[in-house]
Amino acid sequence: MSSWFVYHKRMDSRLSISTSIFYPNAEPHLGHALELVQTDFLARYYRKQGRSVFFQTGLDEHGRKIEKTATAAGLSPEDFVDQQQEVFKKLVEVLSISPDRFIRTTDADHLAVAQALWSHCLETGDIYKKTYRAWYNIKEEEFVANADEVTDPSSLNIESRFLELIEEENYFFRLSKYADQVISLIKSDQYVIVPAGRKEEILNFASQGLQDISISREKKKLAWGVPVPNDPDQVMYVWFDALTNYLTGLTKLENDGSITPNKFWPYDLHCVGKDIARFHALIWPAMLLSAGLQPPKKLLVHGFIMIDGRKMSKSLGNVIDPFTVQQELGGDALRWFLLARIPTTGDGDFTLQRFHDVYSSDLANDFGNLVSRVMTMARNYTGGVPDVDPLNLENLEQVLIEEAWQGYHQKVADLEIDAALMLAQQMVVFANRRIEELKPWVLAKDETKRSQLEELLYELLEIIRQVANMYEPALPVTIQSLRTSLFAELSDDEFSQEAWGGLRPGMSIPDQNFQLFPRLLS
Ligand code: MSP
């Protein structure tokens, strides 16, 4: 085997994946939950595939919004973010999110890496200072127009209370210098943007030209930020602080200030919402190129959770608290809804009614009911997992499962998580239909139908094992409870093998009647 091959195989077995980092200026909402569960699904899926995964999520703790909200709450920004991070960590916990690092941009190592990256770009000549007059949107924390070009701010369509005219000396990053390089990375899919429609949108935007961007603020106007190296009057503003979080998690800083990313670099996948896709697609790779670091490989852009057709957001006052929803039906139920019933890259509506309907149909009636009825029948009719030769059965189920796996893996590779889960769900629907058609309770009364009954129950239990594996990255708590009950006697390899027949013939079925997803009383 050539060394190239060994190297390549090793590279392939690693995967780095991240969410964006959330602003903790308000409580977490369902949009944050969506991004967390999508990313967590992928992290769990790839771990299950034997890849060594590094998964990062966290908080974007600096900036004007945080400073203002803290002041309004009578707290220092430090105390405010310390308090808020607890709530976001709680969300990570109740949704069974499995990050390897929860980064906070106030972490000491992040400050050092952000400053080091800045210094590298400065050395390359890509950071310069100039006086700037611009309209600034304090709500979105962005410069919206050059004030020399736009003299009448009402043309900007932004509420005047959110607009400030800013005139100050700022540092700028030479984004324009990297425009062609970044466009070509995206066009050639060296940096893949999913879905294709977003890639087009971003390329269209970039083809109109990329301006250099302001990357610092005067310290007297914004104190709450990472200090610009060697300039006590300026702090970093947004990009060099926030985007750099991804580098911090994978980097060792040498004593001489050089940045040595670890084996997980470059980033395989960033998962972000459509409102911040552009920054990740265009600015982030440019910053890395400037510092001589490899750009990321893929960007997954999700849509928005909508309420009655409108984006769920604090400013519209229609935010749904993920804790309330989770407490009602459990973290797995919410994960399922967000993963399977919101299109991975599209917008999706959330209403409590819809959440209840999906819970009842997909989880309680389809999957939960299948597990409970098959366990009961196997216990009562065959005293456990039927003692048949799994490879010697009529092979319809086997063929369907093999097809389902193929489709499932393909859909996950295409980052269509909802479609992958629907393929698994179809196997559940098929199994329930099989029960209705073949009526095991009738077969059980007829001794001459014994082998038919045994085959059927084996097949149904084996489908449950297979589907449990497909569902595991989506429903970790539920599947763990099946793993330690119905499948307790199986080794890890037997439980997780994709080949038909992992379920051991003759195995006992625990004597407990459990409802994975209790029915709702309507
Ligand atoms: N802090 C910045 C990101 C910096 S990344 C280097 C930020 N924070 S945010 O809290 O406003 O948004 C975090 C993520 O939540 C974004 O990816 C955003 O798209 C997502 N969502 C915010 N509202 C959303 C919905 N209503 N629905 C789905 N996700 C949405 O932007």
Image (spheres, helix red, strand yellow):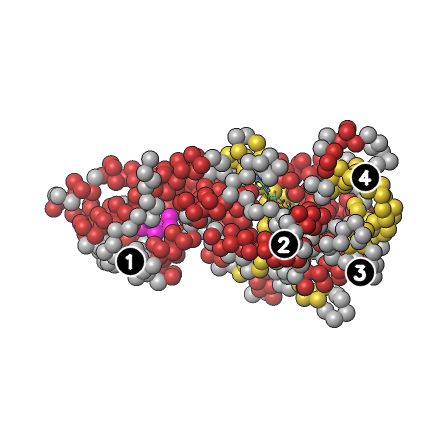
Q: Nearer the viewer, mark 2 or mark 4?
A: 2
Q: Which residue ends up furthest to the bottom in the rendered image?
A: 255
Amino acid on which disc 2 is placed: Phe
Bounds of the magenta segment? 462-468
Relative to 357, say whether 190 is above or below. below
Residue 368's image quarter? top left
Amino acid on which disc 3 is placed: Pro
Q: Which residue is mark 3?
A: 229
Q: Identify which residue, 401 or 216, lies in the foreground.
A: 216
Q: Is residue 152 magenta?
A: no
Q: Residue at x 59, y 53 (%)?
A: 84
Quadrant containing ligand 1: top right
Quick one: label 1 or label 2, which is nearer the N terminus?
Answer: 2
Quick one: label 4 or label 3, which is nearer the N terminus?
Answer: 4
Q: Which residue is mark 4?
A: 165
Q: Which residue is mark 1?
A: 504
